[in-house]
Amino acid sequence: MAMQTGVGLSKILILAGAGYTGTVLLKNGKLSDILGELQ
């Protein structure tokens, strides 16, 4: 039970971190630069 809760929390943290990073990149206009390099 504790393991499942830990996994759920880690997934939420990862998603929150990714969302926050994406928002910061969008505000800085760097996300489009990164996407341009990837393509």
Image (cartoon, rainbow, N blue to C red):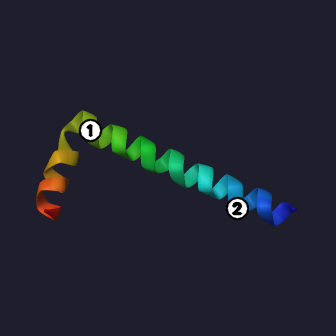
User: Where 25 sits versus 10, above or below?
Assistant: above
User: Where 17 sits versus 6, above or below?
Assistant: above
Which residue has dot 1 on it?
26
**What kind of residue is marked 1?**
Leu
Q: Residues within 10 Å of mark 1 (few under 14, many from 20)?
A: few
Q: Earlier in the sequence, mark 1 or mark 2?
A: 2
Structural distance between the alpha carbons of marks 1 and 2: 28 Å
Q: Residues within 10 Å of mark 2 (few under 14, many from 20)?
A: few
Farthest top residue in view: 27
Q: Position of residue 10 (x, y in %)?
A: 64, 57
Q: Quadrant of the C terminus?
A: bottom left
Write the residue at 58% across / 51% down: 13
User: Where 27 sits versus 8, above or below?
Assistant: above
**What kind of residue is marked 2?**
Val
Farthest front residue in view: 39
Farthest right residue in view: 1
Write the residue at 70% across / 55% down: 8
| Residue 7 marker | 2
| Residue 39 marker | none
The total number of labels drawn is: 2
Write the residue at 28% across / 43% down: 25
